[in-house]
Every structure is written in structure tokens, then in C-alpha cells.
Amino acid sequence: MVYYANYLKFMERARSDMLRAAGIDQRAAIDDGTGVYAVAEANIRYHRPAKLGDDLVLVSTVEQVRAASVLIHQQVMRGAELLASATITAAFLTPDGRPTRQPREWVERFAAIQKQEA
């Protein structure tokens, strides 16, 4: 069976891929001192276990965009079967770790994602 903490790793990768697909360049934001996302809260529920060799699909949905954070709902699926679900709060932080407003362009990209999902 898949170790429970690995689901968080899967979700982290899916969120990073979602941001990259939306055109949000986290590496550039870190390099230029704009800031970085960090998980401030993770609420996860395990429904069924995944097993070694299972093909899993992660579904990430932008639930809410706030000035300095974004709520993302994530599901780990094996076919049509829900294995785990989570709500993640990703806070946008300055390089010294203080909450700050997300770049306006990023908020607009999240809004576009929400519109596509609706």
C-alpha cells in the first residue's frame, strides 16, 4: 500500500504542474525576490488505499483566490475511484517568510482557471 505521506508528495507535484501550466513561473519569482508559495494548511482525507503499481490521476481545482493565498482542492483518483481528497491553502510569502499579496497577473491567471473549471 502507498504510504500516507506520499499522497502529499503527489499533490505537491500536481500543484506545481498546474501553476506551470497556468504560466506562473515560481522559479523566476524566487530568483527576482518577488516571493514564493508555501503550504499554510493542508486538510486531507483518505478514502481508500492506493497500491504499488496503481495508475493514479490527480485533479486540482482552484477553489478561492485571496489577496495573499489560494485555496486548491485536490483529488487522488484511481480511475473513477476517489482515494484521497484535500483542501490546500497555499500562502504567498516574501523571501523572508512574511505573507504578501500575490502578483496581480497571477491572481488573474487563477481567475481564468476558475472560469474554465466552472
Image (cartoon, rainbow, N blue to C red):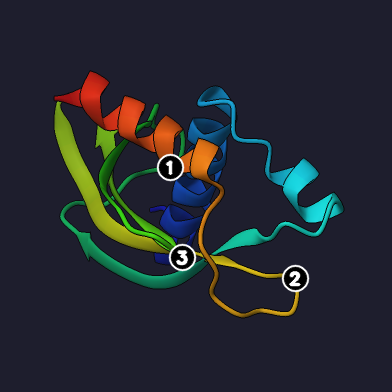
Residue at the spot x=19%, y=51% of the render? 48
Q: Nearer the viewer, mark 2 or mark 1?
A: 1
Residue at the spot x=72%, y=57% of the render? 34
Q: Earlier in the sequence, mark 3 or mark 2?
A: 3
**Residue hosting label 2:** 95
Is 20 situated left or right of 44 in this image?
right
Q: Quadrant of residue 97?
A: bottom right
**Which percent across, then down, holds residue 6?**
49, 57
Q: How many dots with numbers?
A: 3
Q: Quadrant of residue 50?
A: top left
Q: Which mark is residue 5?
A: 3
Q: Are marks 3 and 2 in contact (CB under 8 Å)?
A: no
Badge 2, how many Cα within 10 Å: few under 14, some, many 20+? some
Residue sticking out furthest to the right: 31
Residue at the spot x=54%, y=23% of the render? 21
**Which percent across, then down, holds residue 55?**
40, 26
**Which percent across, then down, holds residue 9?**
53, 54
Badge 3, how many Cα within 10 Å: few under 14, some, many 20+? few
CA gap, disc 2 and disc 1: 19 Å
Residue sticking out furthest to the top: 116
Res 64 visible: yes
In-front residue for pair 25/6: 25
**Residue hosting label 1:** 107
Q: Amino acid at mark 2?
A: Pro
* Image quadrant where one finds the C terminus: top left
Res 79 visible: no
